[in-house]
Amino acid sequence: DAGVIQSPRHEVTEMGQEVTLRCKPISGHNSLFWYRQTMMRGLELLIYFNNNVPIDDSGMPEDRFSAKMPNASFSTLKIQPSEPRDSAVYFCASSLPPGAPEAFFGQGTRLTVV
Amino acid sequence: AQSVTQLGSHVSVSEGALVLLRCNYSSSVPPYLFWYVQYPNQGLQLLLKYTSAATLVKGINGFEAEFKKSETSFHLTKPSAHMSDAAEYFCAVSPLSGGGADGLTFGKGTHLIIQP
């Protein structure tokens, strides 16, 4: 299996622009998670889906952030409009609970908002 | 609610010495516990997991961890450090009742430095 695939790996955008991050989970996994990693706050869970349904989005920092999972093999995280403080590494992860609770992570998208 | 505390943001050991990275957790329900490793500019890779079976868990690259409920700890050890072990290590917790579907709560991480 190719693992969790994220695109793009790097994104540089100007403040105010819309940014869309993409994720393809491991085939067969039914849970998907979006995390954000910064030096100041560490790894934060933003939102997660079970069977394509958003379960908890309490970690989404603001209404500027939104996430969708239209099918079992694709998810997006959108920031509109982007701000410099959104600069971070965004990770997507997937898992197959309850038998295998560990999350498998993608390589991440490094977002820089200037 | 769950939380994880990793003691020591940086740990330095000599090559060949014992590695000990500390993790204490807080959970209102029985937990799953995990250790992940992150190399520069990469994602997180699972080292090992505790899922309520054996309290001493062996993982990849010679690492192991022991679940101690009385101490709410899940410390990571390796008998002999190798230069390739230099990385960031994260301890994480998830409620066992959720089967892992609720996501992981991570500690702040410990940067392991290996001195030649």
Image (spheres, coloured by chain):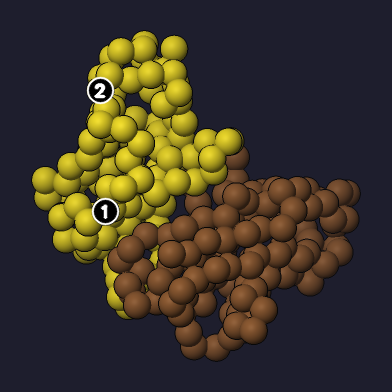
| B115 sits to left or right of A49 | right
Residue that protrudes farthest toward the left in the picture: A70
Judge whether A6 appears above or below A11 on screen. Answer: below
Tag count in the figure?
Answer: 2
Circle 1 crowding by C-alpha within 10 Å: few under 14, some 14–19, many from 20: some
Residue in the image at 11% along x and 45% along y: A70
Numbered tag placed on residue A80 in the rendering: 2
Say which amino acid is labelled 1: Asp
How far apart are the alpha carbons under marks 1 and 2?
20 Å
Chain containing mark 2 = A
The answer to which quarter of the image holds residue A68 is top left
Can the viewer see residue B8 in this picture?
yes
Q: Quadrant of the N terminus of chain B?
A: bottom left
**Nearer to me, B30 or B110:** B30
Chain containing mark 1 = A
Residue in the image at 25% along x and 23% along y: A80
Say which amino acid is labelled 2: Gln
Q: Identify the secondary structure beneath mark 1.
A: strand
Q: Identify the secondary structure beneath mark 2.
A: loop
Q: Position of residue B93 (x, y in %)?
A: 49, 66
Which color was chain B given?
brown
Can the viewer see residue A10 in this picture?
no
Which color was chain A given?
yellow
**Nearer to me, B33 or B58:** B33
Q: Position of residue B65 (x, y in %)?
A: 64, 75
Q: Dot 1 corresponds to which residue?
A: A56
Q: Position of residue B81 (x, y in %)?
A: 79, 61
Q: Position of residue B50 (x, y in %)?
A: 51, 77
Residue in the image at 27% along x and 28% along y: A64
| B19 sits to left or right of A82 | right
